[in-house]
Structure formats: structure tokens, C-alpha cells
Image (spheres, rainbow, N blue to C red):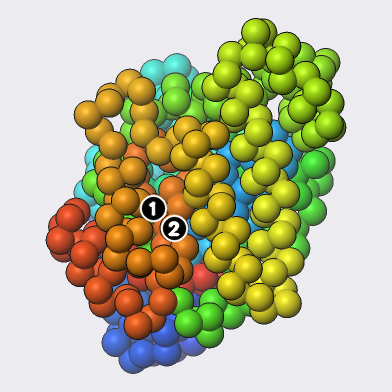
Amino acid sequence: MSDCTQLLAALKNGEHDKALAALYALDGTARRLDEARDRAVRTAEAFAARFGAGAQGTALFSGPGRTEIGGNHTDHQHGRVLCGSVDLDMLACAAPNGTRLVRIQSEGYPALEVDLDDLAPKKAEENTSAALVRGVAAKIRELGYELSGFDACANSTVLSGSGLSSSAAYEVLVGNIFNHFCCDDKLDPITIAKIGQYAENVYFGKPCGLMDQMGSSVGGAVFIDFNDPAEPIVERVDYDFSKSGCALCIVDTGSSHGDLTDDYADITREMGAVAAHFGKSVLRDVPLADFRAAIPALREECGDRAVLRAMHFYDDDRRAAQEAAALKVGNFESFLNMVNASGLSSALHLQNNWSIGDTRQQAVPLALAVAAELLDGMGALRVHGGGFAGTIQAFVPEERLKLFKNGMEALFGAGKCHILHIRPIGGCVVAE
């Protein structure tokens, strides 16, 4: 069991370089490894400065962001998705503190403190990090584990409000800390993902599906079938995106997801209303033929937008499986065609490219329009994540990458086009 001083020495001496390289240096460059080591050292130094260098059991933890590759808003209807963890993450140095308090100092944010003897949901805490910590702790206690407090210093490279799911990364990070300190690492990645979803639904106040947490927790590129949400089928897709000839780019439009909870809730509500017409709770349980036959009645009962959003569910649910199948056999051209089809469906049917609550803000459609001009019929484009604001996703041919990046950053600002990698490891203990 190391204290913070020992962990810092090991990090500086390169003893944890292999673990860091597996998470962050996926392009194989020494520069990326140096940056990862420097960040890990800085995180541990922040912990030592705030909580003391002698804290026993100090360890480094990571909760990655995730990219949704296929299946936009299908998970909450028990559909299928294709997603993956990325090399942007939340990193924390943490240690047990021998109390009943969880104390977390996140870089750039006020410190938070959660009392483990008071784990009831709090209305005033909704949409806060404290709610996520309290919710994760409550669920782990419900699973029968004895909780104890810890201290942590954290920082993030996950873009807030970007569709890379910073909330899921935080839930997975906290879940892994509790798992290591309180559960003897007995919680598997799927269980940690479910714990995170519970915290977000019940404590944070966001009715999300399970894809975000699963993509962050499991790691790599994964195909997930949520037909039985209690026991989702999780299948790793072995495809090396670095050999595709395309770079995975996430473009940050600078528009935030922060005030869009109602827009997301409307999608779930409207799809649910269509399912309810058939006496079902989710669209996955409604046969496509039955839905198609009932469209005239559904227009009257639920409205045209609900019908269009249901159409998107059936199409993107099918496409996610087809995309995974195409990658498994190495048919990247077919995969790109389906990514483009998903993007078109999201715009026309799902209608999550901009919010009717603020018609002046249409950064995502603007980004897609300019990106399409830059790609000139090559690669693929689509809205990324929950939509309405945030980011777009692009698969950019390497020969057009410089042109694409320069064009996107001329529009949205320097550093707004992020070249990402699918990292093979989800939430984890990085070093101890």
C-alpha cells in the first residue's frame, strides 16, 4: 500500500508508463506519453498539496469519456448501440480518509463534500456532481457493501456539455474509486455502468439510458443490445480504427448541453407515447410492422414528431447492428455510409440537431454544413451524442485532415477540432 509520496516517485520514475501509454499514448508518440505522465504527476501533486503526501492507499483512477458511434437515442428504448471509450478522461488521485465523508476537489470547481450517512436524494442537489457521488454511494450500499470515506483531487480533459458524456465519465470514475476502496474491486464494469445510470436518473435528475455509462465503463469499441436492460448483451468489436485511413474527429461547437434536459426528456416521452399506444413501455417491444400500420392513428394520438422519432428508432436500431457487423469484417466503406445515414435520420426524423427553445442557436447544423463542404463527399458526418448542442462527429480521410481541422477551427476557434482515439480500457485503477 503506497502513500502519495511513493506514488509520485513511481510516476516520475516512469514505473507506470506502460499503464499510461495504454490509455493515452495510442498514437505511439513519445510526446503523448510525456503529456500523460506530466498530467498524472500534476494530479498526484494536487492531492498531496490539499490532503497530505502521507495519505495511505493513494491510487490514480480514470473514467473515460465515450463516443457514440451508432444508435442515436436508441438505448432508452431498449435498442442497440455501437459506442467506445476515448482517450479523453477524468483522472483522480484518491485515498481512503478513515471518515464517513467523501471530499473531492475537481480542478476549476468548488470542493464538494458528501456525508455517507445521509444518502437520500436531495432536490437542491439535482444537476450537480454531489448528486452523482451521493447516488453512486447509495446504490453501492444497496448492493450490500460497507461504505467508507475518501479524499480525491480530479481533473478532466472530457469536454463539458460536448456529447462525450462528462457526467458518465464522472460516475464511472467515482464508481471505480468506491469499488477499489470499499468493494475489493468486486464490481465489474457493467455493474459500475448501471450504478452510474442509477445515480444520473434518480439523483442527478436526467432520464438517460445506459449507453453513456456502458461506453465509459467497459472500454474499447463495444456493441450493446439493451433488449434486457438488467442484463444487456455487451460485445467487443475488434476493429482498429487507426488503420481505416480516417481520423475520428469531434468538433466542439461551443454550445452547451447544460440547459437541454427538457429536450432530451421530450424524446424519451414521445417515443414512450408511441409505445404506449400498443400497451408497451418501450419501442423495442413493438414490432415494426405494427408501428407502420398504425401511423395514421399515431399521428392523431401522439403527433407527427413522435411518429418521426419512432421511425428514427427503428432505423438507427437496425443500423447500429449493421455498423458493428461491417466493422467486424473490415468493410469500412459500408460503415461510413451507415454513419452518414444515421446523421441524416437524426436531423430529419429524430430532430435533435437544434433546440426549438432557442432558434438562434443552431451551431450543430452549421458545423455539419461547413464540415460537409470540407469533406466534399468523402468520409462521414453526424451529430454526436444527445444532440441539440455540443459536438459533431466526423470520420475524416487522413489526406483531408489538415484541411478539415483548419476549416472547423476557423469557424469555432482554435482547439475546437479534437482528434480522438478509441482507447481499449474503460474505467480503471491506473496506478497504485
Where is residue 221 drawn, in percent x and y? 61, 66
Kind of residue indicated by mark 2: Leu
Kind of residue indicated by mark 1: Ile
Describe residue 363's horizontal placement relative to residue 75 as left or right: left
Q: Which residue is drawn at 49% across and 29% down?
A: 264
Could you tell me which secondary element the residue under label 1 belongs to?
strand
The crowd level at tag 1 (other Cα within 10 Å; few <14, some 14-19, many 20+) is many
Q: How many marks?
A: 2
- For the question of whether residue 265 can be seen, the reply is yes
**Quadrant of residue 377 in the image?**
bottom left
Q: Which residue is drawn at 55% across and 27% down?
A: 267
**Where 371 falls versus 281 (above or below)?**
below
- Residue that label 2 marks: 381
**Quadrant of residue 209 in the image?**
top right
**Quadrant of residue 188 in the image?**
bottom right
Where is residue 283 drawn, in percent x and y? 74, 30
Asked whether disc 1 touches disc 2, contact meaning CB atoms under 8 Å apart, the reply is yes
Where is residue 253 drawn, in percent x and y? 27, 49
Q: Residue at x 54, y 77 (%)?
A: 241
Q: Which residue is drawn at 33% across and 43% down?
A: 365
Q: Which of marks 1 and 2 is nearer the N terminus?
A: 2
- Residue that label 1 marks: 392
**Where 91 falls versus 313 (above or below)?**
below
